[in-house]
Each structure stands twice: as structure tokens, then as C-alpha cells.
Amino acid sequence: MSQHTISPEITFAPDHSGGTRAIWKTFIILSVLTVIELVIGLAIYNIHKGENPNATLVLAFKGMVCILTLAKAYYIVSVFMHLGSEVRNFIMTIIVPLALFIWFIIAFLWDGESWKNLRNTNGGSREYKPTTEQHHTVPATTEGKKD
């Protein structure tokens, strides 16, 4: 004889009536930020197509794209990874190592550029010459010299 036990767990279909508003809000916010980034990217492209591109304006636009990208990343992490509703200490456990990792990347790139420039000038003992400009000298010919 087999004995059947009734499970105390009862499963009901989830109620999704109130969750769609938050999804649509997230969709609209991320879409607007993406469209703004694309418009700025198109502006950067058109500036570069011109004869004399304004470097300051291009740098400002690139900075705005970086800020918008960080805003989108924050919103995605906050909403989709549910980090926005967590305890502050848990959020800091995620954010502080990430910030340190980004800082390490920036510091290593900065140090590498500095090392390249110092190496190019022998530690400041000679004039700086850009590495993109290659100077090739042709050796002098020794005509009339007998071996």
C-alpha cells in the first residue's frame, strides 16, 4: 500500500497587474537616454566631418556621453539587479570595489603614459619628440674612399 501525503505548499499563479507600470517606466527612461546618446554621437560624427573640428566641443560631447552611459548603468543596476532596494551596506559592498577597479585602470593608464613620455625624453635630459613622428636619417655616403 502506498501512502500519499498532501504537500503543504500551494502554488498560485503570480499576480502581475501592478508590475507593468514600473517596466514601462524603465523602458521609457532607458530609451530616452539612449536616443540622447545617439543624437550626441551623430553630432560628434558631423563635427569630425567638418574641415576644422572644435576639439573642446567634441570633448564636451564625449563627456556628456560618458555621463549618460553611467546614468544608464546606474539605473540598470538599480532596477534590474534590484540593488536600489537593498540595504546601504550591501550597496557599498558592490560599489566600492567597482570604484577601486575603475580607479586602478585609470591610474595604470596614466602611469603608462607618463612612463612612455619619460622614456621618450631619457628622464628629461633631452627634448621631447612625439612617438608618432619618426625621424629617419640616411647615412652619409663615403665616395672616393678606398678600402
Image (cartoon, helix red, strand yellow):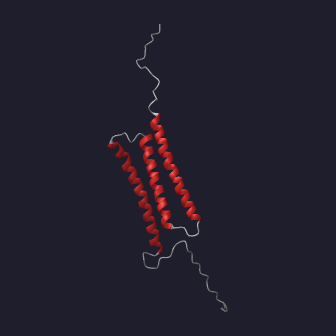
Q: Nearer the viewer, residue 87 or 97?
A: 87
* Relative height, residue 65 to residue 112 (above, below): above
- In the picture, measured across the screen, residue 99 lies left or right of residue 2, that is left
What residue lies at 61% left-to-right and 83% top-to-bottom? 139
What residue lies at 49% left-to-right and 64% top-to-bottom? 57
- In the picture, measured across the screen, residue 13 lies left or right of residue 94, that is right
Q: Nearer the viewer, residue 116 or 47?
A: 47
* Relative height, residue 3 to residue 93 (above, below): above
How many numbered discs? 0
* Relative height, residue 133 to residue 6 (above, below): below
Q: Residue furthest top?
A: 1
Q: Nearer the viewer, residue 44 or 101?
A: 44
- Where in the figure is residue 71, as x and y percent of width and height? 44, 50
Quarter holding the C terminus is bottom right
- Where in the figure is residue 107, as x and y percent of width and height? 41, 61
- Where in the figure is residue 99, as x and y percent of width and height? 39, 52
Q: Nearer the viewer, residue 141 or 97?
A: 97
What residue lies at 38% left-to-right and 48% top-to-bottom? 95
What residue lies at 47% left-to-right and 34% top-to-bottom? 20
- The image quarter containing residue 6 is top left
- Where in the figure is residue 26, as x and y percent of width and height? 46, 41
